[in-house]
Amino acid sequence: MREFTKDDLINFLPKFRTFVGIDSDGCVFDTMEIKQKGHFHPAIIRHWSLEAIETQVRAAAEFTYLYSPYRGLNRFLGLCKTFELLNDWPEARNNAILPDPTDLHVYCDSGLPLSNATIKSEAERTGSTLLTEAYQWSVDLNEDIDQNMPDPPVFQGAKEALKLIAQKSDAIVVSQTQAVALLKDWYRDDLAQYVSVIAGPELGSKIDDFNMAAVDRYPAHAILMMGDAPGDMAAAHAIGCNFFPINPGHEVESWKQFMDEGYTQFLEGGFSAAYQKQLIKEFKALLPGTPPWK
């Protein structure tokens, strides 16, 4: 199982005239619900002794990580947002001692790649108790997922689409899932053969990945981002490329639509403004911005 570095992105050599960046969790693999509800959220409750407000913690974490425009955030960004929501929720803050997310917010805004290595380094540099706790939460979370989470299935249609993409476009994985889990998934299901690089947060943000591998090598209309989260759409907007959403809760239908019409339109010169607008409208409607308890 090969591990990838920034050099693999910086020195990327095109073989085709088009480029596709593909997210992993919730896009190719049906991981989001079980990973979040079965591992992420219980670990937050356990690490910060929030059993007294388990209902509120789960609601805030589910909204942040799954059912809102924050879906797909890096785990540390999601943790910070979850704590912010809880501190703003009287029913939560009045019944538990909540972490002050300030140090985590500063770390998330630092411009550093958000990974176990950098949060550990920042915890040691600053002496922040919260960053130390968040680092340990992340390490324990990786171990729990590795040892106890069932192997996630691939969404119906995704493997066939990856095979097709590999025949006509250069492709890489761009994900905020940490490499230890990311590589395991792509090599276990023998999907790594269809992509040139598997990039997790250790190599930078999704925008960083595109800037290193694609932006100066392909025209914008020849670059496509595929993902299930607003962060994927934001990355596409940032570099001015096409975006094809794998809609949460409608993943199989999305992969079928991609195979039936989306990929053909992309290869023929990129999405029309009308087609892109419709895709984004349907995607945004699935992820409301207001928590249900507001």
Image: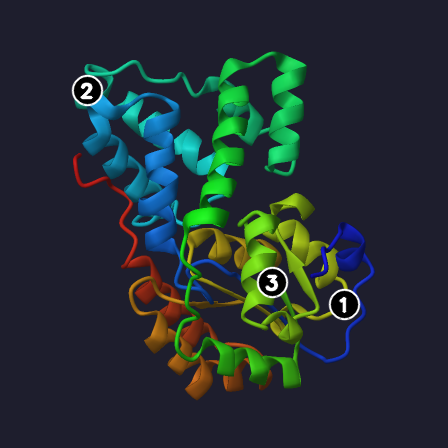
Q: How far apart are the alpha carbons under marks 3 and 2?
A: 40 Å
Q: Are marks 1 and 3 in contact (CB under 8 Å)?
A: no
* Tag of residue 191: none
Can residue 89 be seen? Answer: no
Q: In this orientation, which residue lies closer to the viewer: 278 or 191? A: 191
**Contact check, label 3 and label 2, Cβ < 8 Å:** no
The answer to whether residue 31 is above or below residue 172 is: above
Disc 2 or 1, which lies upstream in sequence? 2
Task: Quadrant for residue 165, please give it.
Answer: bottom right
For the C terminus, which image quadrant? Answer: top left
Q: Amino acid at mark 2?
A: Pro
Q: Position of residue 65 (x, y in %)?
A: 37, 45
Q: Name, please, the residue furthest toward the front.
A: 147
Secondary structure of the residue carrying tag 2 is helix
Q: What residue lies at 44% left-to-right and 70% top-to-bottom?
A: 154
Please name the residue that numbered disc 3 is placed on.
173
Task: Evaluate if marks 2 and 1 touch, with contact meaning CB atoms under 8 Å apart.
Answer: no
For marks 1 and 3, the one nearer the N-term is: 3
Q: Nearer the viewer, mark 3 or mark 2?
A: 3
- Compared with 104, 11 (above or below) is below
Name the amino acid type tagged 1.
Arg
**Residue 48: x, y in percent?**
37, 22
For the N terminus, the quadrant is bottom right
Please tell me which residue is depicted at 17% across the width and 22% down the height of the picture: 91
The residue under label 2 is 90
